[in-house]
Image (cartoon, helix red, strand yellow):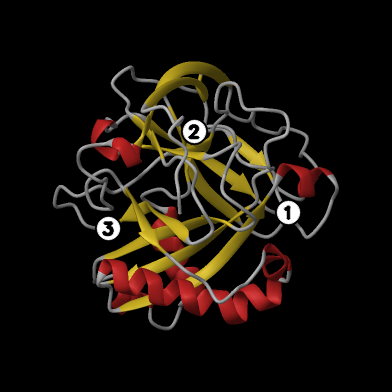
Amino acid sequence: MTRSPAASAVFDAPLNYLREPPAEKPAFYIHMPLPENARRGPQLGPRTMPIHDARQLDESPSLDAEGVELVEARSDFRSQHDFYDPDAVRTRYYPEIEALVKRETGADRVVAFDHNLRSRALAEANLHQAQLPVTFAHNDYTEDSGPQRVRDLLPKDAGKLLERRFAVINVWRPTRATVEESPLAVLDAQTMGPGDLVAMDLVYPDRVGEIQSLLFDAKHRWLYYSEMAPDEALLIKCFDSARDGRSRFTAHSAIVIPDTPPEATPRESIEVRTLAFF
């Protein structure tokens, strides 16, 4: 496809970080009323950071270095309406994503297990189970919750699978059209320090999950891909059990491009989470 020559190599945009290290572990309460002694959610504040167009870098980011990789990902789903059917996504789209991750990473086995459709317009209209874009810097899994998902989803095989290297890889793509507003920015994992990520609980009625929010560091380098199209996808590494120097966690957030015109096509996207076993 033809790319706009107006895309800037770098621009400034606000990102929501943790204001400070929390005194106690933060918690989000999902689909349930707040308990009497509810813990606070993460206390966030904006920091303006340079956002680099990864298309214009001298070397393309990779999954094992920066923690993100852009790949060609044509789909048999022909329109965004296909993605509005969650059963069709599970039965027809998940196998595409499993094959994609297997091809791009060399994994022996890939299991797609969850997805989210995101669109501000659809979410505000309460349509198609769509959710709002996430507008704070976070990572989907932690040192504990990554392995726990294997135990939850594959209980019979978990013991043997956890003896091998595995990764949780999020596959993100636009579904409606070229992304003109609210693109996804990803933190270069090489610029993240060991204490930058802070665990917080996601409390559901029947279980407790765990993700990570992010403390500010001026050394962070944020990346995005200009004008992403529906035939492209981002592979984002949210967890890797390997401790051999490759990236293990990757923070990400929706951002606002400066001077986005009001007539810009609203972003619609889907993300599928996968377990990749090597």
Pick the residue in front: 93 or 29.
93
Q: CA distance from mark 2 to mark 3?
A: 22 Å
Q: Earlier in the sequence, mark 1 or mark 2?
A: 1
Residue 32 higher or lower than 161, as above or below: above
Query: What amino acid type is highlighted by mark number 2?
Result: Ala
Q: In screen coordinates, is 214 left or right of 105?
A: right
Residue 226 relative to residue 242: left or right: right
Task: Say which quadrant the C terminus sits in.
Answer: bottom left
Residue named by callout 2: 137
**What amino acid is found at the position of numbered circle 3 in the picture?**
Ser
Closer mark to the observer between disc 1 and disc 2? 1
Task: Indicate the position of residue 193 as horizontal and vertical percent values.
Answer: 27, 30
The tally of labels here is 3
Name which residue type carries label 1.
Ala
| CB under 8 Å between discs 1 and 2 | no
**Residue at 55%, 27% in the rendered image:** 257
Can residue 202 be spotted in the picture?
yes
Q: Which residue is mark 3?
A: 241
For mark 1, what is the residue?
A: 130
Nearer to me, 164 or 92: 92
Query: Looking at the image, is mark 1 or mark 3 nearer the viewer?
Result: 1
| Position of 150 relative to 204 (above/below) | below
